[in-house]
Image (tube, grey):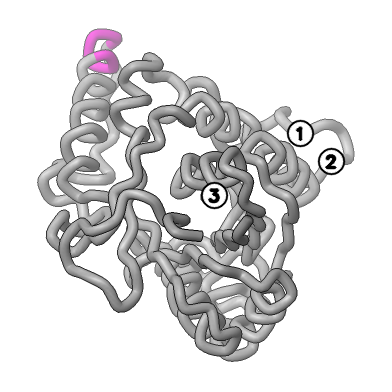
């Protein structure tokens, strides 16, 4: 048995980026540890969703534990920072946010867990945090430094195949736009045309392609556990099961010090 520590910025990130490899590792007998930098305090929630007296932070922590159980996680830890919000928002500069944290200080918190767990594998994010969110970029920086401090040699940057994202998400966005137009609703264009989306990394920069189609049911169930952020009407949950499997049945990584070029199909191989 080996130990996988998977490091994320906010509750719900774990199931989107690494849900498949987490469940796969757990099913194969490995120990899976989830570390989340923030409690997602700035997540958006519809009016009336929370119970009377319930705050979003408490709800998101509970959702994280529920999703973690679905994904086979043995331990959940929060580093104690607060959500920084999207890039460019005033909240980025608020003291105590993950974005304003000292990389070394945050890395020491994560490294302590890596040492406690004798971590064999650590997952972080790519250097753009997948899509430019400040907390995701900070996961990359803090994760890399923590691995150095703890001596964790096997580090994978969770990312996305940019070509696949443009293909699948672009098609979904187009379908949503057509459905909206049929109802006389003007579809938002905030992301711009799919061919310009800077999400993930080009295929030639990736080093690991993990087929997780056998685990997409668990991955989708974990997404559903984050009901405050991922509604049944969301992009993730509204698509038919076969389409979801096509879009989220492969998870992509860049192994630190390896590549470029796909050379691995299992981040726990040999352990």
Cα–Cα gap, marks 2 and 3 = 23 Å
On the image, the x and y values in percent for residue 75 come to 74, 55
Q: Earlier in the sequence, mark 2 or mark 3?
A: 3
Q: Is residue 209 visible?
A: yes
Q: Residue furthest top?
A: 182
Label 3: element kind:
helix
Return the mark for residue 54: 2
On the image, the x and y values in percent for residue 127 come to 34, 72
Give the residues drawn in magenta, as a range.
179-183
- Above or below, 241 relative to 94: above
- Horizontal side, residue 30 vs residue 162: left or right: right
CA neighbours of label 2 inside 10 A, class few (<14), some (14 to 19), many (20+): few
Q: Are marks 1 and 3 in contact (CB under 8 Å)?
A: no
Q: Are marks 1 and 2 in contact (CB under 8 Å)?
A: yes
Q: Which residue is mark 3?
A: 14
Cα–Cα gap, marks 1 and 2 = 6 Å
Q: Residue at x 43, y 19 (%)?
A: 238
- Horizontal side, residue 14 vs residue 110: left or right: left
Label 1: element kind:
loop
Residue 180 lies within the magenta run: yes
Q: Main secondary structure of the magenta part?
A: helix
- Above or below, 1 relative to 174: below
CA neighbours of label 3 inside 10 A, class few (<14), some (14 to 19), many (20+): many
Q: Earlier in the sequence, mark 1 or mark 3?
A: 3
- Horizontal side, residue 52 vs residue 248: left or right: right
Front-lying residue, 19 or 1: 1
Return the mark for residue 50: 1
């Amino acid at each position: 048995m080996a130990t996988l520590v998977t490091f994320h910025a906010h509750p719900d990130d774990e199931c989107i980026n690494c849900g498949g490899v987490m469940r796969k590792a757990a099913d194969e007998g490995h120990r899976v540890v989830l570390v989340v930098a923030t409690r997602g305090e700035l997540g958006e929630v519809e009016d009336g969703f929370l119970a009377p007296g319930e705050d979003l932070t408490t709800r998101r922590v509970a959702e994280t534990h529920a999703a973690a159980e679905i994904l086979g996680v043995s331990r959940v830890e929060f580093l104690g920072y607060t959500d920084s919000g999207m890039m460019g928002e005033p909240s980025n500069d608020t003291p105590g946010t993950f974005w304003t944290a000292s990389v070394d200080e945050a890395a020491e918190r994560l490294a302590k867990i890596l040492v406690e767990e004798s971590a064999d594998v650590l997952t972080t994010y790519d250097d753009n945090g997948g899509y430019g969110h400040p907390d995701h970029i900070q996961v990359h920086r803090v994760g890399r430094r923590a691995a150095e401090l703890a001596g964790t040699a096997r580090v994978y940057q969770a990312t996305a195949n940019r070509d696949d994202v443009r293909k699948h998400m672009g098609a979904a966005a187009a379908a949503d736009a057509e459905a909206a137009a049929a109802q006389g609703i003007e579809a938002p264009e905030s992301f711009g045309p799919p061919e310009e989306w800077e999400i993930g990394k080009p295929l030639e920069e990736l080093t690991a392609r993990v087929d997780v189609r056998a685990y997409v049911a668990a991955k989708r169930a974990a997404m559903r556990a984050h009901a405050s952020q991922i509604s049944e009407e969301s992009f993730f949950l509204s698509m038919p099961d076969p389409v979801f499997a096509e879009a989220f049945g492969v998870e992509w990584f860049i192994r630190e010090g390896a590549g470029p070029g796909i050379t691995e199909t299992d981040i726990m191989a040999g352990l």
